[in-house]
């Protein structure tokens, strides 16, 4: 079965400027025109051309509310611990999965995920929709979605600095020579703020250096996580 490029999408010559983009790449397969997909799924994450992750967020919200509706049907028969386990299994596992990729995207997009957590908290605690949700989240000791993203990145940073993460992450970080005793990291320059600032090599040092020294110098991962959550919890609900 022959496969050829259509006449509207000739291959880019080797001498073409590296910034050139082929916007109309179409394949002709056995007389059928096949256009490229605007989205790609990799390890469960839906990627779009601008890396806005909007399609991924929409799908995440849709699936989460689907599971919340199913849990709500059996909630009267569940004990609070059982309901919380279901919520952590079907909701939080999705909100936390690869959530470090959401760092630096539009705040409006992040805010689309917060109603999922709010709905889960209301379902667990039988809180009515007209009641303010912040005291409920605080009583449950749940970090807001934006702070959970920060928590994930900083946890990965601690692991990378203590040989608890893959070498490719550790190689992205370097300690600042001017403040070795303080445990600060050097922050590389970024040419593209829209994408470069979201890279782990830049986001991790920025967040790490903003932590109190006591947290950065934690002796173990469990201690670091405990201190970090306390710090972020205080920041979120102060």
Image: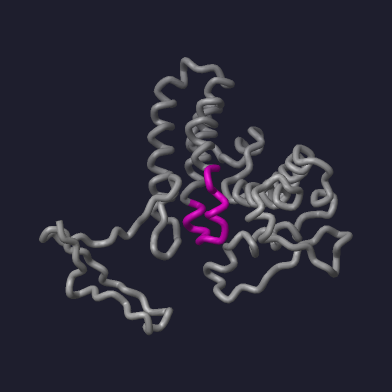
Residue ranking furthest to the top: 77
Task: State the extent of the magenta-drawn residues as a range.
Answer: 96-111
Residue 172 falls left or right of residue 82:
right
Count up the numbered dots.
Answer: 0
Position of residue 6 relative to residue 85, above or below, is: below
Q: Nearer the viewer, residue 238 or 157?
A: 157
Residue drawn at 78 percent across, 62 percent down: 175
User: Which part of the image, by quadrant, shows the N terminus?
Assistant: bottom left
Q: Is 104 contained in the magenta span?
A: yes
Res 238 visible: no
Q: Nearer the viewer, residue 77 or 210?
A: 210
Q: Quadrant of residue 222?
A: top right
Position of residue 217 relative to residue 136, above or below, is: below
Q: Where residue 112 sits: x, y (%)?
A: 46, 50
Residue 99 falls left or right of residue 182:
left
Residue drawn at 80 percent across, 49 percent down: 215
Q: Where residue 204 sits: x, y (%)?
A: 67, 58
Q: Is 155 contained in the magenta span?
A: no
Residue 7 falls left or right of residue 170:
left
């Amino acid at each position: 079965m022959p496969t050829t490029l259509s006449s509207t999408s000739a291959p880019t010559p080797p001498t073409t400027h590296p910034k050139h983009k082929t916007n109309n790449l179409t394949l002709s397969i056995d007389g059928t025109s096949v256009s490229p997909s605007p989205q790609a799924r990799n390890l469960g994450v839906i990627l779009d051309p601008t890396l806005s992750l909007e399609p991924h967020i929409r799908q995440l919200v849709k699936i989460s509310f689907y599971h919340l509706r199913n849990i709500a049907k059996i909630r009267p028969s569940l004990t609070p611990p059982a309901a919380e386990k279901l919520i952590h299994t079907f909701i939080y596992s999705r909100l936390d999965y690869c959530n470090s990729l959401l760092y630096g995207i539009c705040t409006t997009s992040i805010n689309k995920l917060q109603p999922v957590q709010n709905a889960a908290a209301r379902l667990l605690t039988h809180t009515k929709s007209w009641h303010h949700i912040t005291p409920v989240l605080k009583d449950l000791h749940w970090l807001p979605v934006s702070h959970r993203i920060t928590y994930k990145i900083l946890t990965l940073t601690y692991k990378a600095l203590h040989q608890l993460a893959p070498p490719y992450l550790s190689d992205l970080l370097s300690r600042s020579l001017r403040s070795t005793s303080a445990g600060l990291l050097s922050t590389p320059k970024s040419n593209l703020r829209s994408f470069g600032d979201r890279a782990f090599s830049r986001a991790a040092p920025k967040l790490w250096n903003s932590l109190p020294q006591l947290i950065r110098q934690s002796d173990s991962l469990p201690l670091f996580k405990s201190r970090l959550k306390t710090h972020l919890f205080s920041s979120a609900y102060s």
